[in-house]
Image: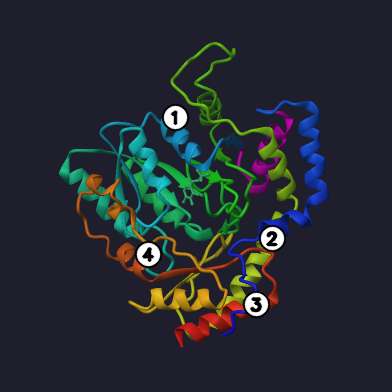
Amino acid sequence: MTQNVAPIPFLDLKAQQARIAADLRRRIDAVLAHCQFILGPEVTELENELARFCGASHCVSISSGTDALQIALMAEGIGRGDAVFLPAFTYTATAEVPLVLGATPVFVDVDPATFQIDPAALEARIAAVKAAGKLRPRALIGVDLFGQPADWPALNAIAAAHGLFTLDDCAQSFGARHHGRPLGSAADATATSFFPSKPLGAYGDGGALFTESAERAALYRSLRTHGEGTTRYEVLRTGMNGRLDSLQAAVLLSKLTVFPEELAAREAIAAHYDRRLGNAVTIPARVPDSTSAWAIYAILLKPGTRDAVQATLKEAGVPSAIYYPRPLHRQPAYRDHHDGAALPVSDDLAERILALPIHPDLDPAQLDRICDAVLAAVG
Ligand SMILES: *Cc1c(COP(=O)(O)O)cnc(C)c1O
């Protein structure tokens, strides 16, 4: 493999910007003209468009995905003494939020094929927490990992049996569908993120909450503005500064116009990877009856080979990334909150997983170069 070709970017936001340049400029100019930078008209328009896109009754835009998760738990009054069940194999924010509120994350193992939180493991962890008698089981944060949906029918049944509030951490998977319906109303509340590298990304931080409950939506609106009441200087509860700004909403409205075709482009890239790499590495198993937003396309390598494979890819100008090199129960900040239960699947995935570039502007020549390099590296 020669080094005289330019490295492929892991994510190419410049190419995407060029595709939407005129529309983006028009929307940004409109914000600069009206100067309502926080909760301006673009924010309301975006909330309406997002709710329509995913078929949810209510959308409340938030300053980030992390803040959206936090506001959803604050609205339920979750705090000290409460157990919040969540997968061990996810981004750090999922576990950080219950801890910030004084609650305890209870890490649950994931499915070895789909990487999604394992419903049977969840049942066992709830039983263990109940038996120990120290924490009150209160909530489940199910994560739709890498673009695919978690097994919400099974998770909801377990949550209902134990009276848990269900929060869908859909930060990576907005735009995915499950049993024919877009994600957004699979749980009591759904949080998503518009961090620039997510499938629908802003040009800064952003997020949103979706719910079917008018009461919850009203609480989310109050909490994102310092707990305000019906008049601006009436403070009903302790909230936070969790608002989305109009420039981010303008960018997202522009990106939403091309989002469906981008999802289709990501799907085609995933299918191409499957065809070319399926005999050489473990390709991602699909959650039945679903479509993925393909935030991440992750392969599994043979134990002990990842460092060498990654180095060989790098030499060929092919970037790769590790989501996640350490499961959350092994993070210094969280391990003291872990009860010591074994989470072998999360441990194994952390050793063997490798993410390949997947974004709508990856061209066929780049895609073939990536596949050639992976085949040579694992050969
Ligand atoms: C990105 C992400 C978040 C946090 O979203 P931010 O907008 O970056 O705060 C939360 N959960 C998961 C699973 C994520 O991937």
Quadrant of the image for the N terminus?
Answer: bottom right
Relative to 84, 42 lies left or right: right
Write down the residue under mark 2: 262
Q: CA distance from mark 3 to mark 2?
A: 26 Å
Q: Position of residue 150 (x, y in %)?
A: 46, 57
Q: Position of residue 274 (x, y in %)?
A: 56, 78
Camera-side residue: 103 or 159?
Answer: 103
Residue 308: image quadrant is: bottom left
Q: CA distance from mark 1 to mark 2?
A: 34 Å
Point out which mark residue 75 bears. Answer: 1
Write down the residue under mark 3: 5
- The reply to whether the C-beta atoms of the residues labelled 3 and 2 are less than 8 Å apart is no
204 shown above or below 285: above
Q: CA distance from mark 3 to mark 4?
A: 39 Å
Write down the residue under mark 4: 111
What's the amino acid at mark 2? Glu
What's the amino acid at mark 1? Ala
Q: Residue furthest bottom?
A: 379
What's the amino acid at mark 4? Asp
Q: CA distance from mark 1 to mark 3?
A: 52 Å
Single out the mark in the foreground, 1 or 2: 2
Per the image, is 50 magenta? Answer: yes
What range is drawn magenta here?
40-57
70 shown above or below 321: above
Camera-side residue: 266 or 363?
Answer: 363
Can residue 282 be seen here? The reply is: no
277 shown above or below 60: below
Q: Secondary structure at mark 2?
A: helix
Q: Residues within 10 Å of mark 4 (few under 14, many from 20)?
A: some
